[in-house]
Image (cartoon, helix red, strand yellow):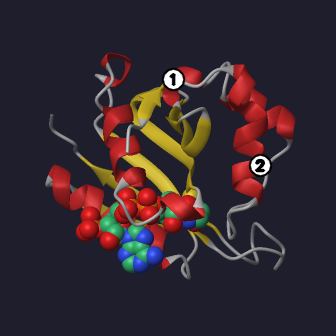
Amino acid sequence: MDIAFRVPRSEDGLAVHQLVEQSPPLDTNSLYCNLLQTSHFAETAIAAEHEGQLLGFVSGYLKPGQSDTYFLWQVVVGEAARGQGLAKRMIQALMARESMASVNWLETTITPDNEPSQRLFKSLARGWQADLSVDVLFDRDRHFGGRHDTEQLYRIGPIVR
Ligand SMILES: CC(C)(COP(=O)(O)OP(=O)(O)OC[C@H]1O[C@@H](n2cnc3c(N)ncnc32)[C@H](O)[C@@H]1OP(=O)(O)O)[C@@H](O)C(=O)NCCC(=O)NCCS
């Protein structure tokens, strides 16, 4: 399948919103937030597209004051395109960009029950021969008032290219 990996544009925002909506357990954000991800933060995001259809998307940003660390906010692959290495290829392509040359660490958060996502980031760490540590970032009770599962911080690095 011929898949384009490209910098998103604001016109992708609605498709991102719909893809996330169809992909539990991801939290949806406002459409406005997705528009910001695909415009102001486009250089630190990536879209995977096939015949005009958005198959996958990664959002994130360089951590404020810490330009060596990429914080990956969400990764999503449409159900029909899963299990073919697409999530892995999107993140690898994103990290290989010239604009990411200063980045040696990747951080993301995952809930304890999201095994596909845990496997994805463990696989990336293995591929980069980098260490992976896991800590609590946002706690179910202390931060979410019991309304959301604990988000564990996965920190991968140093990534040597
Ligand atoms: C998590 C998600 C992005 C994975 O996308 P994907 O394109 O299917 O993942 P890949 O094919 O690139 O798989 C990468 C690795 O993870 C493993 N993996 C992915 N999904 C898996 C699953 N359901 N069960 C077991 N292993 C899985 C793969 O075997 C692969 O490991 P390998 O490199 O050792 O072979 C996708 O399932 C998804 O969008 N889920 C819903 C949204 C979500 O939970 N996002 C993450 C939280 S931010």
Please tell me whether mark 1 sits on a helix, a strand or a loop.
loop
Q: Residue at x 40, y 66 (%)?
A: 83
In this rendering, the answer to whether 47 lies above or below 36 is below
Residue 119 seen = no
Query: Which quarter is ligand 1 in?
Result: bottom left
Q: Nearer the viewer, residue 144 or 118?
A: 118
Residue 60 in which image quadrant:
top right
Where is residue 46 shown, x and y percent of the image? 50, 33
Please tell me whether mark 2 sits on a helix, a strand or a loop.
helix
Ligand 1 under 8 Å from disc 1 Cβ: no
Picture disc at residue 7: 1
Quadrant that contains the C terminus: top left
Q: Earlier in the sequence, mark 2 or mark 1?
A: 1
Where is residue 98 shown, x and y percent of the image? 31, 17
Image side of residue 16 versus residue 97, left or right: right
Say which amino acid is labelled 2: Gln
Where is residue 125 shown, x and y percent of the image? 25, 57
Q: Residue at x 49, y 54 (%)?
A: 108
Residue 107 seen = yes
Give neighbour class at mark 1: few <14, some 14-19, many 20+ (Cα, 10 Å).
some
Q: Residue at x 59, y 57 (%)?
A: 78
In this rendering, the answer to whether 108 lies above or below 97 is below
Say which amino acid is labelled 1: Val
Where is residue 62 shown, x and y percent of the image? 49, 30
Circle 2/circle 1 CB separation < 8 Å: no
Picture disc at residue 18: 2
